[in-house]
Amino acid sequence: MTGPAVDVAVVGGGPAAWATAAACARLDLRVRLVADDPDGAWPATYAAWLDEVDLDDLGADVVAQRWDSVEVVADGFRRLPRAYGRLDNTVLQARLRAWCEQGGVQVARARVVGAAPRPGGITYVTDTGAVADATAVVDATGHPGALVHGRGPVAWQVAHGVIARTDGAAIDPGTCLLMDWTPVPGDDDPRPSFLYAMDLGDGRWLLEETVLAATAPASTAVLSQRLNRRLADRGVHVTELEAVELVRIPMGLAAPRVQDVIGTGAAGGLVHPATGYSVAASLRAAPRLAQALSDAVHRRAAPVAVSAAGWAAVWPADRRRARALELFGLDALLGMGRAEVGEFFGAFFALPQEQWAGYLSGTASAREVAALMTRLFRASPWSMRRRLAQGGPRHLLGALRR
């Protein structure tokens, strides 16, 4: 792989990597994407609130299914009138690859194992000993990151899911169930989990039993048993299993410190600490990061300034402060039992949509996050307030002062 230097080397083969490479190429930067398996399919189910994704640019066909509202069962039933969609991984991947090809992105099959600054840029090394240079290197390899160093997760989101046909409807046909915290009859395990479900059409369903966040989450075997019990209680059984989906997402990643290699996606800490989502945030970050790198490269900035500009694009200062508040929110969630978590989300989604939408999207400012937390505290029952108040004012003020 040894060869002439490029402006940007993007390490990784997932959505964050391809989106970043494509965005840089569209600004006429010289780009190389390096991945173990750059042609590999993306097996995970990706979904997003559709107002978080630039469909005018990506194309509406990157959405495999769309729901104009989603349902939540948490201390009562609610229908949230905010459009939600399941992404078509094949279409999205092909679109990003096409932009990369049009922009002349070099694609290399290799595993990058190290990187170090050099005069004028960064040198990176693969597992075969090959060496190459770039003005900037972006780590988009997912958690824990091949090159970026950051604090590890404080908790994990885990899920056991199936794509299957069933002998009945587990949810209302044609709908998407964002979360159902209803306890499962006969299950005395105190660790809370919820049902996440989609009608995929043609008699197919995505059904996932999910632990939102826990330091010691239930095993996927326990979640599989709980899912089967939940379905059986609704008179539903799997008749044709198409696929099993196992989810393990790091939760509570802080914004990494500024360092020589720039991180994005999960490697850059973009996993939302209250939802586990990162794809939409990664897609949004790509053009910001590309523009910052383009500006820095064209003004011949020093390597340290190029890296700093990239990190500032991925993590603007106010978003770093907001992340500190979001981590406080995760800390409160980790201590909640079954009844409390249902009360919490019941109160959360009872707030006006414009208040909770920005929080879940990871686009709210630090003051907006603080304001939402204050409103949520005031709207919560006294039992919940005690949980939310543990260290609350200290965390809020500390984050806003950073």
Image (tube, rainbow, N blue to C red):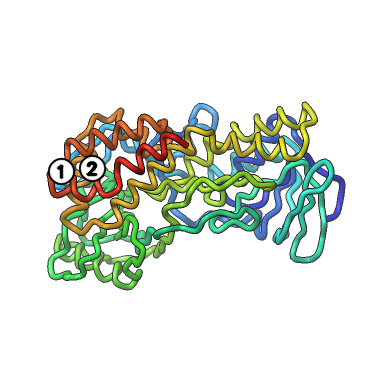
Which is more toward the observer, 212 or 257? 257
Direction from residue 344 to residue 318 in the image, left or right: right
Q: Amino acid at mark 1?
A: Phe
Q: Which residue is mark 1?
A: 77
Above/below status of 180 relative to 174: below
Quadrant of the image occupied by residue 77: top left
Sequence-first tag of 1 and 2: 2
What kind of element bears circle 1? strand
How far across and how far down the image is residue 113, in percent? 71, 61
Q: Is residue 401 above or below residue 196?
A: above
What x and y, as percent, mark residue 244? 39, 65
Is 373 situated left or right of 41 in this image?
left
Picture residue at 75% right of the left edge, 61% below the top: 126
Q: Position of residue 264 (x, y in %)?
A: 58, 45
| Residue at point 82%, 52% (across, down) | 132
Q: Is residue 158 above or below residue 47?
A: below
| Label number found at residue 71 | 2
Name the amino acid, label 2: Glu
Q: Is residue 266 left or right of residue 247?
A: right
Q: Are marks 1 and 2 in contact (CB under 8 Å)?
A: yes
What is the count of numbered marks?
2
